[in-house]
Amino acid sequence: MKREDDVFSINEKEVMDYYGFVGEVGKLKMKSKFTKGWILHSLAYSSPHSGFAIKMQKMRGVKIGENCHLNPYVLLDLVYPELIEIGNNVTLGSNSMIFAHNNPTANLFLKQGEYPRKVAKVKIKSGAVINPGVVVNAGVTIGENCIIGPRSVVGQDIPDYCVAIGNPARVIKKIER
């Protein structure tokens, strides 16, 4: 297999370019960064103590406001944690997943065609409630004081003061102020 057709090498180069890592030393720095991040995430992921989980996620680079609650088994992007911003008084339910990137990792045809790696900030504004099993995709903003129903898949912005459910998530109700 030629180097330019090696999907692993392409993925590695994309991530190294994003973080500004170059050469063999850069590869070592990247592996060290992700090993540290994986350890911190693993500690946070299964912790029954929300404060501890938040501390571990902040050490990874996730921006988390005050008075938040992370249930066990919350997965926050493992490659780009610094692109996730969570406001104050936010609740993340168990088995929710927030991704700041998507990538057809092993499919060169898709990757080099219409579906390249997407890396984009995710913002969850203050007061939002993300129920168990919710998936939030790259580039999404979830509005202030929103409720996202269990197992919903959020692929587009949700305005402030709304209830959204489904796959794809859609607003079903405005919350009166």
Image (cartoon, rainbow, N blue to C red):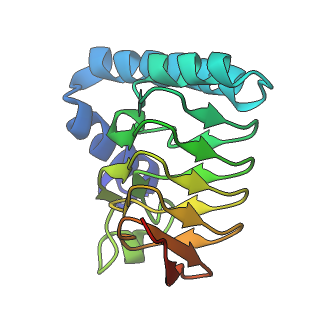
Q: Looking at this view, name the residue that lies furthest to the front.
A: 177
Q: Position of residue 136 (x, y in %)?
A: 51, 60
Which picture quadrant has residue 126? top left
Q: Which quadrant holds the N terminus?
A: bottom left
- On the picture, is 146 further left or further right than 49? left
Q: Is residue 66 visible?
A: yes
Position of residue 88 relative to residue 107, above or below, is: above
Residue positioned 60% across, 55% down in the render? 130
Q: Nearer the viewer, residue 57 or 116?
A: 57
Residue positioned 62% across, 43% down in the render? 75
Which picture quadrant has residue 22? top left
Q: Nearer the viewer, residue 11 or 97?
A: 97
Count of numbered circles on the image: 0
- On the picture, is 20 further left or further right than 37? left
Position of residue 39 relative to residue 131, above or below, is: above
Q: Nearer the viewer, residue 111 or 80?
A: 80
Q: Where is residue 141 in the image (x, y as percent from the top left)?
A: 35, 60
Q: Which quadrant holds the C terminus?
A: bottom left
Q: Is residue 35 visible?
A: no
Residue positioned 48% across, 25% down in the render? 34
Q: Position of residue 50 (x, y in %)?
A: 68, 25
Q: Which of 72 and 113 is in front in this view?
A: 72
Residue positioned 40% across, 70% down in the render? 158
